[in-house]
Image (cartoon, rainbow, N blue to C red):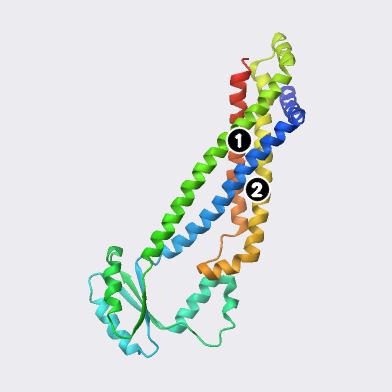
Amino acid sequence: MFRGLRYTIRESFVSLFRSKVMTVASVFSITAMLLILGLFFLLTVNVNMATEGVKNQFDTIEVFLLDETTEEDAAIISKSLTSMDQVADVQFISKDQAMAEFRQRFGSNAYLLDGLTTNPLPNSLRVKLSDIQDGELVAEICRNFSGIEDVRYYQSEISKILDVTDVLQKGALIIIAFLIIVSVVVVSNTIKLTVMSREAEIRIMKNVGATNWFIRGPLLLQGILIGCISALIALGVTFFVYREFVATYGSQVAALMTMEMVSPEFMLINLAWIFAALGASIGAFGSIISMRKFLKA
């Protein structure tokens, strides 16, 4: 048993170097596919997080008050809104409380706000809807009150973000499906060349009683090794690029989207599993196709 295992491992590594050009082509093909997958994964995860953050405001309308609107005036508006069936709750948010929340959303980048000499945020009312379907109606009623500077309701923005996310996901699936097919074909051709170069040796092995899987084992492991090597390269490149991007532009993105980007360490752990599974599966599948087609053992 152990002798057969040693033979399988040794022969798989020998075969990798025996067909150097096709091995490199296979690794390059799978790596390119995984890099594109990683790019869309990173983009989609961050966009989804931003979407979820804004979704939390889906049932909330922000009513910003003019500076001259007093708390008594705000209480009158709040009472009027609370009496509506479409409104579940109304909360008064002072400008100091709004700034504290803003700092919390900035997280570790809150120091960027230290340069402000005055608080530019207005007092506001946070209107929670009973049903988000009534959002536009309630928002329009809020605009008709006096003392209102602006009314912000995010439903249209959310719809646009969801549309963009949907396009990204569908586009990624199409591109990845195409690249997976290309990768499988390239790996299959690599194994095919290995089989053809060892045709005489394989015939002798079969004549002396070698089992089918004794012959096929090294070829299957060769494909898996190609996939794993590709996954390792793609993971390293993706992690390095994303870490540098977060370090360089993370604070700007946080300021723009009022949320921090997903940490590189979190991405590394999740991508490692995805890349390893895909890389090994593509390599193994390419080997199986080649063996079934060119090795009638």
Q: Is residue 193 left or right of residue 173?
A: right
Q: Looking at numbered disc 2 in the image, what kind of residue is underneath it?
A: Leu
Tag 1 residue:
183
Tag 2 residue:
235
Q: Quadrant of residue 108?
A: bottom right
Give whichever of 183, 275 is nearer the camera. 183
Q: Quadrant of residue 29?
A: top right
* Marked residue nearer the N-terminal end (2 or 1): 1
Above-or-below relation of 112 to 57: below
The location of residue 94, given as percent across then percent down, is 42, 83
Q: Residue at x 65, y 37 (%)?
A: 227
Q: Which mark is nearer the camera, 2 or 1?
A: 1
Q: Residue at x 35, y 88 (%)?
A: 71
The location of residue 200, given as percent across then percent down, is 74, 14
The secondary element bearing badge 1 is classed as helix
Quadrant for the C terminus, please.
Answer: top right
The location of residue 233, given as percent across then percent down, is 69, 45
Q: Residue at x 75, y 32 (%)?
A: 20
Give whichever of 106, 147 is nearer the camera. 147
Q: Which numbered dot is residue 121?
A: none
Q: CA distance from mark 2 to mark 1?
A: 17 Å
Q: Looking at numbered disc 1 in the image, what kind of residue is underneath it?
A: Ser
Asked if the residues shown at circle 2 and circle 1 are in contact, with their CB atoms under 8 angstroms apart, the answer is no
Q: Residue furthest top?
A: 207
Q: Quadrant of residue 278?
A: top right
Q: Residue at x 66, y 21 (%)?
A: 216
